[in-house]
Image (tube, rainbow, N blue to C red):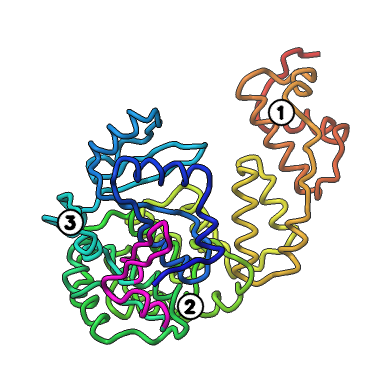
Amino acid sequence: MKVDTPEFRSLFTPGFKILLDLFSKHEYELRIAGGAVRDILSGQVPKDVDFATTATPDQMKKMFTDEGVRMINMKGEKHGTITARIEDENFEVTTLRIDVTTDGRHAEVQFTTDWELDANRRDLTINSMFLGSDGTVYDYFGGYDDLKVKKVAFVGDPTKRIQEDYLRILRYFRFFARISEDPDKHDPSTIAAIKDNINGLERITGERIWMELSKILAGNFVFHTVSKLLEVGAAPFIGLPAQPNLVELQVVCKRTEGLNPRPVTLLASLLASEEEMMLLHGRLKLSSIDRDLGRFITAFRNKSLGLKDCQKMMLRPDANLSDTRVYISELFKYEAKLECLDQFLKWEPPKFPINGNTLKENDVPSGKPIGRVLKALKNSWIDSDFTKTSEQLLNELPDVMRTLNIKPTNVK
């Protein structure tokens, strides 16, 4: 089978043509690999393109060096990957390989020139295909047939594939939601293999789990996919409580249709409290903004916060302006307060009319006293719905300083 579609032809950038010529000149075979082939056969332009080759890493390094091609990011070399920089593009090229030993997380690899052996070590049939520069599709395990009928299946024995890397459990669910047209049409034997090996997820780092789980939460059929993931017993191994709130997840998924919520916004619906959010963070090692977004939603959902409340919250002295804007926007999505969301996104925060220099000129001592006075005056300004002028705030200064037990620099 050959392809000659606009999606395929879009790959032929000047840099790619140079790469092809180099491998041809040195008599090494080069093919497009994995997900990019799947996307092209699905009628999509791939976002990322990986390449596979019969050349070893040492052979590639010599070839690129001899041809004056710069190589970057050499960390992938032990896994057979060399990244070439050509015409301002990066090309990741990986030597064909087989997994000699695995521990469910990492593999010791051995290089090969056998394309079928390399395809055999890949996770899913739809990700195991190669594509030649002439458009020839190399499909050793029926990936194209599975793609046509929207089927997601492991290459060969599901148990063996899963035990090579337990993260493949989450990858299965991610691609199922992406490819399938029926959210419940799982192959029973595949689900049985996943269920039998679900505890292997405890070996996987939180960062890798979140990388896949966040994509599931940003994909199709979120409620159905997460429900199935919990049904096979994943909750304790990915940091979720024993009884996640699936009813709330279903409600929030429905509310947020078309609003593009962040993955953590949906994930928070499964949790009962900030404490559960922090336990989840302990497992997944979330970024600070994702961690605090989850805490914010679990703390303030169902508190009937209106637009004014959130505007004031955003301008509190201890608030990070940009992060708090994200938290509030996501909370309005979570609660489907669309009018508040629209007004909030259009709202430009007013500028606080007092600064440290103004306070110095009015006899407030430098250092911590200025910060304390600024905080008190800003809270007063916020409580006035941002209406107090600098003159009105300075009139409050003597009372504020007395309350804070701060003596002016020049006592009159």
Can you see residue 282?
Answer: no
194 w.r.t. 84: above or below: below
Q: CA distance from mark 2 to mark 3?
A: 34 Å
- Mark 3 closeness class: few <14, some 14–19, many ≥20 residues within 10 Å: many
Q: Residue at x 25, y 72 (%)?
A: 155
Circle 3: residue type? Ile
Q: Position of residue 85 (x, y in %)?
A: 44, 36
Q: CA distance from mark 3 to mark 1?
A: 72 Å
State the residue position of label 2: 221
Can you see residue 309?
Answer: yes
Front of the two marks 3 and 1: 3
Circle 2: residue type? Phe
- Mark 1 closeness class: few <14, some 14–19, many ≥20 residues within 10 Å: some
| Residue 142 lies within the magenta run | yes
Q: Position of residue 311 (x, y in %)?
A: 72, 53
State the residue position of label 3: 98
Q: Nearer the viewer, residue 196 or 111?
A: 111
Q: CA distance from mark 1 to mark 2?
A: 57 Å
State which region is magenta. 126-148
Q: Residue at x 72, y 24 (%)?
A: 356
| Residue 56 lies within the magenta run | no
State the residue position of label 1: 401
